[in-house]
Image (cartoon, rainbow, N blue to C red):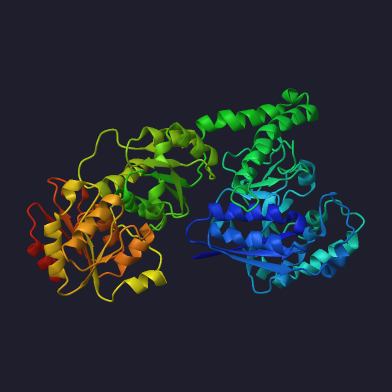
């Protein structure tokens, strides 16, 4: 796991906005990012602290509240700066002392949203520089100090700061220039460390106020800073990027209700437009307006920036979703710093979520028709994808990919033959124009719950004699004979889903068979845990079978339909502990395969 330390400072009034910053970071974190948050607490009330702690539900992380004694900052009180700036903004000046055990941290103001994993930013090479940041938008200041950075986002190398006694440098500059300081802590940092601050890429602090005023016109704003006094949470503000604020707000306990959405989405947009016209009635005469227009709408048509975001679409069944994992792992091997998103049908979220290399899962409801396309595009929280991989040519998923602004959409024009897993993996070959070798799929389920542990014996086999497709099912007499044979050595656990399976298991029980029936009693991840702890799996259903060998359990798959094994049977070279039996299979054959 890659540890990333993040720091924010706020009082109770800004707790909500700090929550949005944290939510945006967690939503966009990669699977291996281990986030540790340090919140410099300038008086956050208990209720708001509890709300912030619930953000762990987005992605597991550590959130630490560091209670601050304002008396430590008495030398900084009364400095002339913006009216909306509070004393909490000066807390960053003492970070080496406030976080004595931390060697590096990214500091964010609370008027930020993050659209990307912070892995690359946190791990930039700083050499002996104590601080890194992005140049400020103020060109007048930059003329006198070309490396003047905006203090809203700063990477603090706390070890270097301690070695160079930077805290004292800040204090000395403040005491010497107290009456001259105009831009608060930002001025203190830049002037006290003039020539000793590393400048990094603009995308990590896109300073945004209105349509024309942005420090960068990148279409990949990894970190957005709402720099003006008009913040997104002010009704009628005209920040160009405020849509991102409301998007991440919905991940927090302060999420808007449907009634509030009408106020903030519709009425707010109208007020923002009218406010901007009043603010700049002759905006269309400004050259900067046409620069913004060109960079926002025209330039992206010809120049595609890399967002390092990839999406894999598979909205089929359990087994098909699992067979995409070779593709997912290979994407991460070729693009290790990328964000990999898996899109699947709602019932199969767990099948995608616990796969190796998948960072995040988004779901669609196939039964909603056109509405699901509009809803998905509207609520999509990440940067436009570099590529969408469509495992099947699906008009809905294709339209979603186009709506998200995908730079490339990869799918097969004709129906592919051969192994389904290999077909999925080969989509990456079409994108990279290089050969991609298939690899074993991996699934990392949750641990067995205490309730399941009580139900499961020490030595058991998982038996799946029924599926959604009747021709695959074992006849009841056949299943009973096989089950009784297997019971000579093992306890049997039967799993399945749905009314058809429940009726099948009732008929099996009526034959006098002894087994533990877990039909409809587990989630997909819990089923994975059950399979992982089994001695082996015997299944006519390829979904549980794929899940079984994905968790490393010996698996026997029974193909009773002619021709299906060619596409759906596992590759023996990738999965040596799998056994395929097909056509006229007898209970004796299955039993002998199990005991061998």
Front-lying residue, 380 or 369:
369
User: Which residue is at 79% across, 47% downward?
Assistant: 144
On the image, the x and y values in percent for residue 216 come to: 65, 40
Residue at 38% across / 60% down in the picture? Answer: 525
- Residue 593, compared with residue 137, is above or below; it is below
* Count of marks, rendered view: 0
Residue 434, placed above or below residue 57: above
Determine whether, in the image, residue 568 is placed left or right of residue 280.
left
Q: Left or right: 392 with respect to 250?
A: left
Quadrant holding the C terminus: bottom left
x then y, percent, for residue 485: 12, 69
Front-most of residues 450 and 337: 450
Report if residue 448 is visible in the image.
Answer: no
Q: Nearer the viewer, residue 406 or 545?
A: 545
Residue 66 is situated, as x and y percent measured from the top left of the image, at 71, 69
Residue sitting at 51 percent across and 40 percent down?
384
Q: On the image, which quarter does residue 53 sit in?
A: bottom right
Q: Position of residue 210 (x, y in %)?
A: 71, 36
Q: Quarter of the image holding residue 397?
A: top left
């Amino acid at each position: 796991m890659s540890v990333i330390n993040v720091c924010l400072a706020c009082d109770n009034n800004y707790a909500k906005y700090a929550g949005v910053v944290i939510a945006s970071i967690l939503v966009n974190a990669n699977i291996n990012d281990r986030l540790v948050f340090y919140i410099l607490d300038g008086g956050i009330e208990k209720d708001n602290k509890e709300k912030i702690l619930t953000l762990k539900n987005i992605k597991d992380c550590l959130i630490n509240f560091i209670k601050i004694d304002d008396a430590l900052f008495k030398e900084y009180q009364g400095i002339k700066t913006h009216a909306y700036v509070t004393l909490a903004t000066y807390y960053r000046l003492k970070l080496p002392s406030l976080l004595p055990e931390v060697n590096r941290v990214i500091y964010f103001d609370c008027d930020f949203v993050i659209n990307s994993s912070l892995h690359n930013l946190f791990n930039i090479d700083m050499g002996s520089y104590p601080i890194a940041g992005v140049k400020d938008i103020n060109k007048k200041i930059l003329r006198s100090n070309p490396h003047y950075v905006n203090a809203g986002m700063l990477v603090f190398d706390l070890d270097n700061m301690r070695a160079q006694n930077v805290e004292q440098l800040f204090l000395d500059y403040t005491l010497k220039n107290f009456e001259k300081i105009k831009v608060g802590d930002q001025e203190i940092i830049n002037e006290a460390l003039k020539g000793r601050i590393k400048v990094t890429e603009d995308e990590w602090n896109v300073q945004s106020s209105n349509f024309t005023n942005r420090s960068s016109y990148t279409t990949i704003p990894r970190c957005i800073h709402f720099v003006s006094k008009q913040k997104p949470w002010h009704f009628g503000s005209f920040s160009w990027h405020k849509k991102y604020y409301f998007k991440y707000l919905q991940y927090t306990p302060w999420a808007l209700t449907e009634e509030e959405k009408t106020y903030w989405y519709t009425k707010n947009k109208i007020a923002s437009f009218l406010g901007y016209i009043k603010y700049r009635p002759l905006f269309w005469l400004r050259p900067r307006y046409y620069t913004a227009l060109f960079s926002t709408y025209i330039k992206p048509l010809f120049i595609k920036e890399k967002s390092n975001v990839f999406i894999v679409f598979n909205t089929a069944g359990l087994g098909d979703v699992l067979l995409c994992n070779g593709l997912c792992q290979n994407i991460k091997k070729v693009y290790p710093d990328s964000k990999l998103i898996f899109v699947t049908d709602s019932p199969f979220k767990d099948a995608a979520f616990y796969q190796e290399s998948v960072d995040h899962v988004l779901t669609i409801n196939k039964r909603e028709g056109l509405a699901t396309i509009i809803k998905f595009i509207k609520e999509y929280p990440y940067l436009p994808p570099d590529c969408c991989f469509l495992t099947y040519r699906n008009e809905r998923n294709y339209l979603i990919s186009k709506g998200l602004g995908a730079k490339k959409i990869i799918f097969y024009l004709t129906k592919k033959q051969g192994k389904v897993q290999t077909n999925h993996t080969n989509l990456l070959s079409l994108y990279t124009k290089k050969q991609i070798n298939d690899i074993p799929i991996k699934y990392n389920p949750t641990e067995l719950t205490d309730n399941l542990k009580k139900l499961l014996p020490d030595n058991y086999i998982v038996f799946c004699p029924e599926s959604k497709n009747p021709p695959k099912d074992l006849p009841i007499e056949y299943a009973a004979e096989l089950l009784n044979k297997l019971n000579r050595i093992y306890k049997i656990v039967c799993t399945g889903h749905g009314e058809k399976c429940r009726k099948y298991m009732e008929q099996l029980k009526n034959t006098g068979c002894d087994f533990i029936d877990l039909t409809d009693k587990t989630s997909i991840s819990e089923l994975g845990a059950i399979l992982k702890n089994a001695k082996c799996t015997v299944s006519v259903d390829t979904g549980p079978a794929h899940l079984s060998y994905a968790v490393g359990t010996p698996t026997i798959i029974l193909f009773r339909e002619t021709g299906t094994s060619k596409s759906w049977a596992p590759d023996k070279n990738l999965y040596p502990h799998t056994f395929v039996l097909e056509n006229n299979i007898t209970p004796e054959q299955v039993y002998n395969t199990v005991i061998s």
